[in-house]
Amino acid sequence: MADVNCYGSLISTRSTCVPLLNTAQTEASQEETKTDSNFVGSQQTAGTFASQQFGQFVLAKAGIVCENDMTYAFIMSAGKIKAALPMGSGIAGGSKGLPAPLPYPKPLLPGDSVQTMANATSDRQAAVSVACTSGEYHVFEVTASSSGEHEFVSVLDGQGIGTTLQGRVISHWFALSGNNDAELTSPVYLLDGSGVPQASVGFCSSTGSVGAVFQPTQARVALNSRLVYRTDA
């Protein structure tokens, strides 16, 4: 896979800014995007720079752009997802609407890192980023290889949404399609234990010119809930 550019910014509740850049983001790999040394003098982990530079940095808006196919981005803190980040593709020269607000602002601490997943335009990995009324965030992904139903699983441990977020209420989410645009036969559905849709969110194109930003919803997750979509190939 090729190395591509990944760049963007984190904006605080006080409108302070952390610029980000990785000129060697490997496609099909989750990697850290550090600060842009062109503007701040060195590459540092985002949370470390924000804490040193601004003292208190409460993340309120974000926008991460990948050169080709965008998949997901999040703040990793002590092995957990602190915040899922709005993102877009730079294939058409930019991504409208970024940086975009987070539903629940989060303080950045030393060691908190920006993790980004980018893909080639031929890759079929799709992803859903969610925010819950509890203030928790999570990211789920799946790569389709044939027709039928495809279930999203946690990017951290491969568990389904029911196991990961049992009892939570999803208040905001967005989905990125991967290279499935011509094969899609459904949006993303949150299914109950009987396989009946309880909520849905439409896909953003992973190579589109508009950023993927959080959309409101109200969806309670049970242990037997599943997050799925369908394709005809």
Image (cartoon, rainbow, N blue to C red):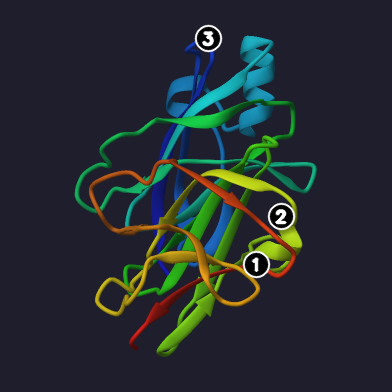
Instruction: Say the numbered circle drawn on residue 44.
Output: none
Look at label 3 and name its amino acid. Arg
> Which numbered disc, 3 or 1, marks the residue that appears first in the sequence?
3
Q: Position of residue 116 (x, y in %)?
A: 53, 50
| 203, 108: nearer the viewer | 203
- Residue beneath the point at 40% across and 89% down: 147
When asked about the image quadrant of residue 188, the answer is bottom left
> Which numbered disc, 2 or 1, marks the residue that appears first in the sequence?
2
Q: Is residue 57 left or right of residue 29?
A: right
Disc 2, SS: helix
Is the N terminus in the top left, top right, bottom left or bottom right quadrant? bottom left
Look at label 1 and name its amino acid. Ser
Is the C terminus in the top left, top right, bottom left or bottom right quadrant? bottom left
* Disc 2: CA contacts within 10 A as few (<14), some (14-19) or many (>=20): many
Instruction: Say the numbered circle drawn on residue 165.
Output: 2
Instruction: Determine the CA span between mark 3 and mark 2.
Output: 31 Å
| Labels 2 and 1 touching (C-beta < 8 A) | yes
Q: Position of residue 44 (x, y in %)?
A: 62, 31
What residue did someone put label 1 on? 225
| 100, 114: nearer the viewer | 100
What residue did someone put label 3 on? 14
Disc 1, SS: loop
Residue 137, placed above or below residue 135 = below
- Residue beneath the point at 68% across and 12% down: 56
Which numbered disc, 3 or 1, marks the residue closer to the eye? 1
Q: Position of residue 162 (x, y in %)?
A: 70, 64
Disc 3, SS: loop
Look at label 2 and name its amino acid. Leu
Instruction: Determine the CA span between mark 3 and mark 1.
Output: 38 Å
> Which numbered disc, 3 or 2, marks the residue that appears first in the sequence?
3
- Residue beneath the point at 64% across and 37% down: 133
In the image as oriented, which residue stretches furthest toward the left? 92
